[in-house]
Amino acid sequence: MRSIWHGSVVRKSINEAWARGASPSTHGFATYSPRLLAFESQASTQELYWQQIPRWRRATSDDFLNYDWQTPVQLFDFLRSVLPHDIPPTSSSSATSPVLLDSSRLINDVTVGIQKAPMSVRLSPHILSLINWSDPLSDPLFRQFVPLGSRLRPDHPRLRLDSLDEAGDSPVHGLVHRYPDKALFLASSVCPVYCRFCTRSYSVGVDTDSVSKVRFLPIAKRWEPIFNYIERTPQLADVLVSGGDGYSLDPAQLLAIGRRLLAIPHVTRVRFASKGLAVCPSRIIDPHDSWAEALIELSDTGRAVGKSVSLQTHFNHPREITWVTEAAARRFFRSGVSVRNQTVLLNGVNSDFDTMSTLIHKLAVLNIQPYYVLQGDMVRGVEDLRTPLSIILALEARMRGTIAGFMTPNFIVTLPGGGGKRLACAYESYDRTTGLSRFRAPSSHITKNGKGGTGNGQEADRLWDYWDPQWSLPGGEGNDAGGKAQAEASGG
């Protein structure tokens, strides 16, 4: 089998570095040691998984692993080229999940779904290569990323577009300051792929038929007021740079933001949020791209002065992990970059114990800390993907004790309206008939409505509400599916 690695390029880079007398500790692919070369040799027998797609059947590893090649494709042209004429039905057909007998009906269903969705569809060749296109209706990655009009359910009457009220906790445009020592820096509105269930559907991606977006442009002029606020707010020790996605920043922008934040005395932790490792991992091992090298440099710079720079990534299903992902994760691990993962709990994608457990164990093997499993946020157009609180409670109860404690994620509800993150099991009350759960969040609302605070004011003792999707309630449309999901989560 042909090599699936940039083998000749990597070996040439390393040999040239050694010929120049360069230390193996220098950045980039010169950091690769004889141990990595052994891994490269093992990797050369791996599957060229993208070649199952007809249009990429002749794509070599040098093609596919080149970041410039990982440009999102035009979805409908791709669907017409890859779908079989006859589409198998789902395992349990219903009124909300009809049998689609041919590809044209599926494409029409996707069209309706996109017209109603708050997020546009943007997918990388890596993700497209992992979907089982012979049976897309049963594929969890297809369900995660591609909306179908027939699967959409009415929005919950209590949800709203900016579900978490991030605008209400933004003292300056593009910065959310909700917790005393942490701020969220929204550097961009672009991602390498777009998630259907995005919390920030009010801003991320291009305008859709249903949503005109609030833009966070990745330009220095817009960032300056954010830096100024952080500099004059000494309680801020932790800054999460997100958006959008850190992958949308070029290496120079990544370095500029990281260096500026590290230069602020009271900022001791800088985290870059990116789904790139999950949806386009080849960039991290592409010797022609320096994004990963920039992150490693920032991590080293921070460590030298006693500060932490880390990557916060986002895997939702074990099938997103390939040998390319493994190579990318190991590069970061060898380079001393801490990587943490947050998973969003999604109905029919990862809401059963076996899938979630497999994902967490695979991440642990790659030294990616399973940091959060997040209850789906109450945002528009994704009620089919949300789960009742009972599912996340059952998953946590069954998960604990199956893996080392430090690799067991926190199971979290992010409270609508700006209540912040709370442990799912910390609810004050939960009525499974109405679907209403209530939580107390004493430390939230630091800058509510633009006003400063300490988290000890009137908001401190407030109860915050989270609502189960209506389809999961007793007598609700789809309650049978909710019961099945509950059994799969709890092992019943």
Image (cartoon, grey):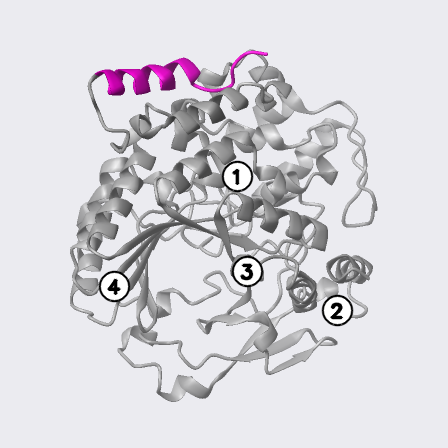
Q: Nearer the viewer, residue 415 or 275?
A: 275
Identify the mark nearer the N-term, 4 or 1: 1
Disc 4 is placed on an element classified as loop
Q: In the picture shown, does residue 156 fall above or below 1?
A: below
| Mark before the other along the chain sequence, 2 or 3 | 3
Tell me: 128 left or right of 265: right
Q: Earlier in the sequence, mark 3 or mark 1?
A: 1
Residue that badge 1 annotates: 121
Residue of label 4 = 172
Provide the residue designation for mark 2. 473
Amino acid type of disc 1?
A: Val
Label 3 and label 4: CA atoms lie apart by 32 Å
**Secondary element at image label 2:** loop
Question: Hey, what amino acid is under mark 4?
Answer: Val
Q: Tell me the magenta residue range.
A: 1-19
Mark 4 → mark 2, Cα distance in angstroms? 40 Å
Q: Are marks 4 and 1 in contact (CB under 8 Å)?
A: no
Crowd around label 4: few <14 · some 14–19 · many ≥20 (10 Å): some
Q: What residue does disc 3 label? A: 409
Which of 412/20 is in front?
Answer: 20
